[in-house]
Amino acid sequence: MSTETLDRPPAKPESAVETIKKASRGLRGSLVESLHDPLTGAIRESDTQLIKFHGSYMQDDRDLRAEREHQKLEPAYSFMIRTRLPGGVVTPQQWLALSALARQYGIGSLRLTTRQAFQLHGVIKKDLKQTMQGMNAALVDSISACGDVNRNVMASANPVESKLHEEVHQWAIKVSEHLKPRTRAYHEIWLDGEKLVGPAEEEPLYGPVYLPRKFKTGIVVPPHNDVDVFSQDLGFIAIVGKDGEEAGKLLGFNLTVGGGLGATHGEPQTFPRVADVIGFLTPDQMLKVSETVLMIQRDYGDRSDRKHARLKYTIADRGVEWFKGELFQRLGYSLPPPREYKFTTQGDRFGWTRGYDGRWHLTLRIESGRVSDRPGAPFLTGLEKIAAIHQGDFRLTANQNLIIANVPPEECMNIDKLVADYGLGKALFTSPVRRDALACVALPTCALAMAEAERYLPGFVDRVDELLIRNGLKDIPLTVRITGCPNGCARPYLAEIALIGRAPGRYTLRLGADAVGSRLNVIYRDNIDEASIVAVLDELFGRYARARKTDERFGDFLWRVNELKPEMRA
Ligand code: SRM
Ligand code: SF4
């Protein structure tokens, strides 16, 4: 292809969502009218796209679909609200406010997401505004938590373990604020802000049609790749000084671009991709570099096909050298080569850790991030009790877990007692597989789910644990991630074992990611049921038990013995 044809995306017809964005007057659309329509629990079709930019999705309870259809009722519509929470930090007061809203307007559960945010499910249309207002009264917003904009900026959890982590968390906030849309539509619609008269506000970074697709940013502090930095459109790997005066100081970041995980079954032109590491920058360059990467994607991303619209495709199509050239030209300077870094782990570290200032942080395992009151697991109440006495803050991890952070030493025992009383610590004593496993929400709320994920995880992990014990592999570390479809919300493509929903009870089995989040797994078997998955894993675990090297991970073993081959990448 000539450079000329590559200059700008070819003039293909724009996708329908582009037209909706263009006509929306800064993301307002007819949301106000939709919200006031008493005849339906739904909002207008075009508004279902726009409301995402405000941090909400219209959903319906899929468990009830058939029955409601039978009764000739419209689907049981409700709304999910997702917060914007850079680095995932909230105060105890904010926790209590969100928990109360989940009880009053939601389904009595807070869902901690894989991007360090909260989701409230099941808010019906007439309560949506009050819920948004309640969140904002607690100083938690949901602007650009979804939609074709920069999403919640992730940062390595436990950001108070060292001063450096704290600094990195501050950068996550700054990047999030910097890349936030400027439209006042959110304030106007949800918070009764002054009504706009005349044309929509200027969007200096986004322009009138925002990005071609979602855009995700994460900042990581090695050696723990807890945010799966290579899955982000835009990533920053903190580089820390080692010697002399620089020791322990944040020197800057390696820049990563073009990660992304969503794909579609049977469509090889869609694929997960790990990001390229393209240069080093100093902290003062971070905001300019962030906005420039975003604007390149704004200008070159594919606006005709939403399945091909992420930055990863722009880079895969045009090449990383093209991207670097464009970036450096727009910046007016080149970035020097990336600096050395090393990751040693991927998920969270559990239990108590001591911070640099003597305060303590307790990382709890919250399976699938689901905080609700269930028999034997009254987590919603338990965490409310903790929030009521906690003097520090709460930090959501990128793996759906929770850190009770900044606990003064004299308070640790009180926290421990409540953790024990409400069963919040039990999961810390389960197998490493169960502790590290992730599952996306899937059914019943996710419209795109093809199979169960969150509800299937506990049972599937039981099977895996049984197989490991049978094969003499009890308590080995192993990453297992399940999603209800190939969109990749629990980042399954970066797990040693992944199940990707195909149809009810059927999954694609992918194997062979590494344990630091830098190598994708590959398709091992497609569209199989649990019995087949168990049989396959049993056989592979047997071989692994017999032939593995000391400390060799399952994913690495499969590649070494040629069970997995590069041509299986798809
Ligand atoms: Fe996701 C769509 C849930 C993280 C890739 N994701 C959805 C929707 C909104 C379904 C929909 O469009 O109707 C899901 C709502 C389910 C529900 O009922 O709540 C949903 N995604 C989630 C969450 C809650 C999963 C979880 O269990 O924690 C995560 C919320 C994160 C947040 O707080 O912002 C979540 N989604 C991710 C991730 C992981 C990440 O970002 O680290 C990915 C893969 C990384 C990536 O984006 O490449 C991800 N979600 C997708 C995609 C595929 C995008 C693509 O490029 O193809 C979709 C579908 C879409 O956008 O059309 C999607
Ligand atoms: Fe829904 Fe698929 Fe995301 Fe799971 S991976 S939450 S099923 S979109």
Image (spheres, rainbow, N blue to C red):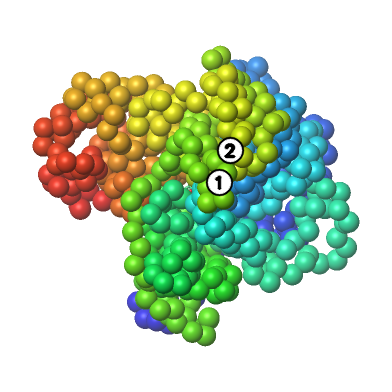
Which disc, if any, is residue 358? 1
> Where, by quadrant of the figure, is residue 119 drawn?
top right
Disc count in the image?
Answer: 2
Q: In which quarter of the image is residue 474?
A: top left
Per the image, the residue denoted by label 2 is 409
Answer left or right for 335 relative to 414. Answer: left
**As shown in the figure, which amino acid type bears the numbered disc 2?**
Pro
Residue pictured at 40% horizontal, 51% vertical: 224
In the image, residue 497 sits, relative to residue 520, either above or below, namely: above
- Report if residue 36 is visible in the image: yes
Which percent across, then down, holds residue 180?
Answer: 66, 61
Q: How dense is the environment of label 2, judged by Cα within 10 Å: few (below 14), some, or many (20 and up)?
A: few
Instruction: State the CA–CA distance, disc 1 to disc 2.
Output: 7 Å
- Residue 268 position, x and y percent, is 33, 52
Badge 1 or badge 2: first in the primary sequence: 1
Is label 1's Cβ within 8 Å of ligand 1?
no
